[in-house]
Image (cartoon, helix red, strand yellow):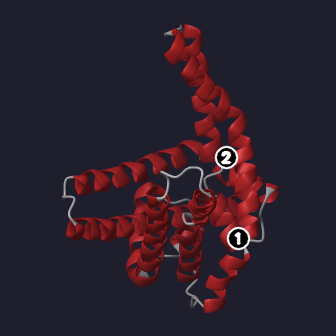
Amino acid sequence: MYEKVSERELKISEIFNIAFEIFKQNIKPIFLITLISYAFLAGVALLHSTIASDVNSWIFILSSIIFFSVSFIAPLVPAALTTIISKKTIDEEEVLLGDIMGFFKKIPKFFVTLLLYAACLFPLILPFVVAILVMAEAGTYTSLYVTILFFLVAIIYIAVSFYFLTNIVAVTDKWGFSALKESFRLVKGKWFKTFIFIILSSLFVLMFDGNLAGFGAGTFQIVVGSLISALAGGFFVTAQCVWFLNRVRSSNVERE
């Protein structure tokens, strides 16, 4: 089954099927990585909200710095490590401790790459937010609707085009502008398919979250809900990794 990843472009249904097999084969590490990342982020967020009332305290300032740093790094961990695990599984290689530790050495490269990504989005997000605020204050105008729609489309286009940034930095030597260019190259020509893939994954996650919201608010329900969310999150991150690896290999075949 895994040889399909290298032979040709996969259908979306095949991506999810292969991701399910990889997820089953590596469910413990992927689940634990995702759960620990979620739990750590939730713990820091809870601590930050607890002391948020004293906004003049130096502890609040320190907590804010830690919270935003963790919010930046935590989502990288499952995406990057799952990419490494998925690649090793597809290549039928053993995942070594050095492979995992290599991620932490790349954190500065992740930081620089995502800062550049944010720099690409900021000039679009700022006027988008300003247009919404102006419309809320002044009323509805056709020109504002057109402006908001224009910047919204541009933001979505950039976000989808740079969808593979974390995967690229995790398993290649590319980072910074090189990673941005590589992600744009991989998505180019497959933008709508990547967009549909993101929408489907997001809808599934929202379905899980919606079902869990009605599950109850007790401690037991929260724990069970968190475990299920970690499982779902781990699976869809694995699916993203499969689509990324398939794009890398099928695009190389196309160029040859």
Q: Which mark is residue 107?
A: 1
User: Amino acid under label 2?
Assistant: Lys
- Mark 1 vs 2, N-terminal side: 1
Nearest the camera: 198 or 93?
A: 198
Quadrant for the N terminus, please: bottom left
Q: With respect to residue 242, does 139 lie above or below?
A: above
Q: With respect to residue 129, does 157 lie above or below?
A: below
Residue 255: in sight, yes or no?
Answer: no
User: Amino acid under label 1?
Assistant: Ile
Q: Nearer the viewer, mark 1 or mark 2?
A: 1
Q: Are marks 1 and 2 in contact (CB under 8 Å)?
A: no
Q: Residues within 10 Å of mark 2 (few under 14, many from 20)?
A: few
Quadrant for the C terminus, please: bottom right
Query: Which residue: 57% across, 88% down?
Result: 95
Nearest the camera: 203 or 3?
A: 203
Residue 102: in sight, yes or no?
Answer: yes
> Total number of numbered labels?
2
Query: Which residue: 61% across, 19% down?
Result: 147
* Quadrant of residue 18 within the rendered picture: bottom left
Rendering coords of residue 189 (x, y %): 64, 45
Query: Which residue: 71% across, 64% down?
Result: 110
Nearest the camera: 146 or 51?
A: 51
At mark 1, the secondary structure is helix
Residue identified by numbered label 2: 188
Q: CA distance from mark 1 to mark 2?
A: 27 Å
* Quadrant of residue 250 within the rendered picture: bottom right
At mark 2, the secondary structure is loop
Query: Which residue: 25% across, 70% down?
Result: 224
Q: With respect to residue 119, does 147 lie above or below?
A: above
